[in-house]
Amino acid sequence: MYKQTLYKIVEPIKDHLIKSFNKNKKWEYGYNKDYDIIVISKTGKIGEIYEIQNLRIALPLQEKVYKRSNKKLEQYWEVFKHRPELKKIKTIFDWKAYPDTFKKDLHGYIDEEFRRREEGFWFYNKGVPTYITGTHYMYLQWSKIDVGQAEFREANRLFFIFWEACKADARSYGMCYLKNRRSGFSFMASGETVNMATISSDARFGVLSKSGADAKKMFTDKIVPISVNYPFFFKPIQDGMDRPKTELAYRVPASRFTRKKMDNNEKLEEIIGLDTTIDWKNTGDNSYDGEKLALLVHDEAGKWEKPENILNNWRVTKTTLRLGSRIIGKCMMGSTSNALDKGGRNYKKIYYDSDVTKRNRNGQTSSGLYSLFIPMEWNYEGYIDAYGHPVFETPEQGVKGIDGQKIEIGVIEHWDNEVEGLKNDPDALNELYRQFPRTEKHAFRDETKKSLFNLTKIYEQIDYNEDLKRQGVITQGNFQWEDGIKDTSVRFFPNKNGRFLISWVPDVHQQNRYIVKNGKKYPANEHMGAFGCDSYDISGTVDGRGSKGSLHGLTKFTMDNCPPNLFFLEYVARPQTAETFFEDVLMALYFYGMPLLAENNKPRLLYYLKRRGYRGYSMNRPDKTLYKLSVAEKEIGGIPNSSEDIKQAHAAAIESYIESFVGYNNEQYGTMYFQRTLEDWAAFDINNRTKHDASISSGLAIMACNKNKYRPVAEIIKEKVNLNFSKYDNRGYKSKIINK
């Protein structure tokens, strides 16, 4: 059974405290630092607290709930019929012309619509009290889209709740939404633009997309029609054309004050406009530079292709949303992702820089935005039931969809069928993943032709590993010396914050094994496997980042109780000091009793091993005989990374391993369980190896386990040898010596 959910209900606050604050209406809209929640209630009362992508959001207290029917199965969202007497009233000026008796009858209706817009709306959905935000209500009830009225979808309900939290949180610049195609983001963003603009004064609202033409189309085809179709009581006074092409201006037209009226000495009514505008800009790094925006809609942010750069643009436009340190505007950014070199890489960075669990001392994420991902199965057209919920699994009997059509297959099975049909077309398959992702990794799939290695196999393995997450294949933790006494024995301690990931440990009798030759320690399990390492020498860097230390362990084929050709250890980290990293490496080598092949261009690790008495654990470069090693290589071991031959051999080693042991082979999947390394292989650039620590160390581990392949073959030199034998002329009866 499919059990994934986009949110969970949490209880970080004791019930009696919530009730006490509710009684006095003390819950203020915005971020509550005391309880680390974001309150989106505008009534002073809160109810359930949702956790959506690590963001805790307090909903309003459930009080008045609309019930369409007393029958549970007939309870769902339905657009409320518009009052027919209001159809002819287009502006506030038309309204003022009607008698008070007519207007009095409608005051209650209009006031209720304003309340719902402000506070949100509760309704029963198949027997469940369901809350939608005011923005969501305006989208469903009053926003005209291409198909007429928007559908209620559970995925969109959670989207709007998350968005409301972004608006409420003074630390947030908005959201970065990673979506599937046809999820409705453009219309939802357009609806929110009009909703906010029509209640804001002296404000500016902007729209950007992957091109100026796309931004213009969103403005003219989505934003303007929504504004035009708002009821008069939500629609401010507008200047200019009803359907403008470049700017929608909510201000008093100059034509209201004509010369004729002034000459006739007519008493002019004071008219106040919002002085608010909505416009769009051409795509570029400096779009809206120097402006002050209340809302910036960033549509198709994952599709900005060179020379346009979404990263550069966001660095500029971010400043339009703040005054000093105070955030005064929000950004609604959303997109599917292109291939990495077609805009996807930059969007990927913004998305992961928007992780709400990683904040600076000001409480902000690196990008300032909050990331949200909704898997495709939650928002796929044709697979949403009448209550707005996805039909995940194939039902025994057909289910009525929200569009009135019968749903006879679950969205998961449908997606699996699509994937199966594209197995032989890797690029088409990856495009499907990007357009309709079920995981974040799907969304950022790259094109196979852009990779040095077999991306199809790598992604097959990644997908397979995703299904193994809950099966405990990998354990996280740290190694420590027994009782803290070095050079005794090493133990592994599970720790969710540990630097090591391991998938196998040797039997107890095989742990901490070494042999002594000529007074020096050597690993006793070299026949079982080896390690590869990409080290670093400097503890700190100027920018606080720097490359990470990377270590991988790989087994060989052996008759011992050891799984063959298994990457059993992954370490990609940068501890506070280089010495901590060196000791981590040493403990892993000692525990497994296996040697290490490391790059010697950053030699501090190798000197550290020698100084600690473990030179025997450092392998010599396999492509040279002992007598041809340099003085430094004889002293500490290791292999240089400068040689082009070494680079090619290293890449070939990874390529060979992937072809043989990664992905689907011989009716079974490989046992390479480390996702970070697989992703690093997928992005590996042989001309820019410094960014790929995991690829460097894993490739060295493969080379270490296959060192015989790189053993130099002695050159055979053929020379003529003079044996100094005399030569004879055997003609005649007597042989004669031939003198030369």
Image (tube, rainbow, N blue to C red):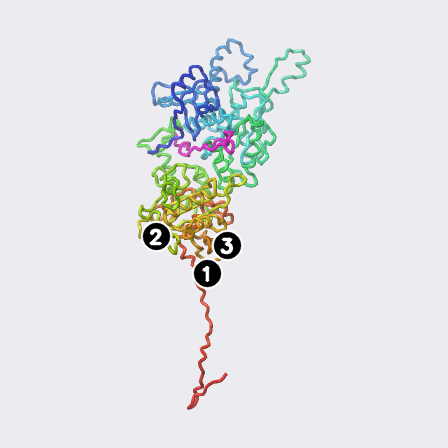
Can you give x and y, in whole percent of width and height, for residue 345 in the image? 50, 40
Residue 555 x, y percent position in the rendering: 36, 49
2 vs 1, front mark: 1
Closer-to-camera residue (415/363): 363
Q: Do labels 1 and 3 touch, CB within 8 Å?
A: no
Which quadrant would residue 251 be assigned to in this image? top right
Identity of the residue drawn at 51% across and 53% down: 642
Dot 3: element: helix
Q: Which residue is mark 3?
A: 644
Residue 569 part of the magenta-drawn span: no
- Left or right, residue 112 beside residue 279: left
Residue 186 pos. (x, y %): 49, 30
Q: Report the residue at 38% width, 52% height from top.
A: 522
Name the amino acid, label 3: Glu
Label located before the other in sequence (3 or 2): 2
Amino acid at circle 1: Tyr
**Residue toward you, 435 or 439:** 439
State which region is magenta: 357-384
Q: Earlier in the sequence, mark 2 or mark 1?
A: 2
Q: Are marks 2 and 1 in contact (CB under 8 Å)?
A: no
Q: Of the residues shown, which amino acid type is indicated by label 2?
A: Phe
Above or below, comparing residue 610 to residue 63 in the picture: below
222 horizontally vs 475: left or right: right
Alpha carbon distance from label 3 to label 2: 29 Å
Name the outermost residue toward the bottom. Answer: 733
Mark 1 neighbour class, 10 Å CA radius: few under 14, some 14 to 19, many 20 or more? few
For disc 2, the marked residue is 557
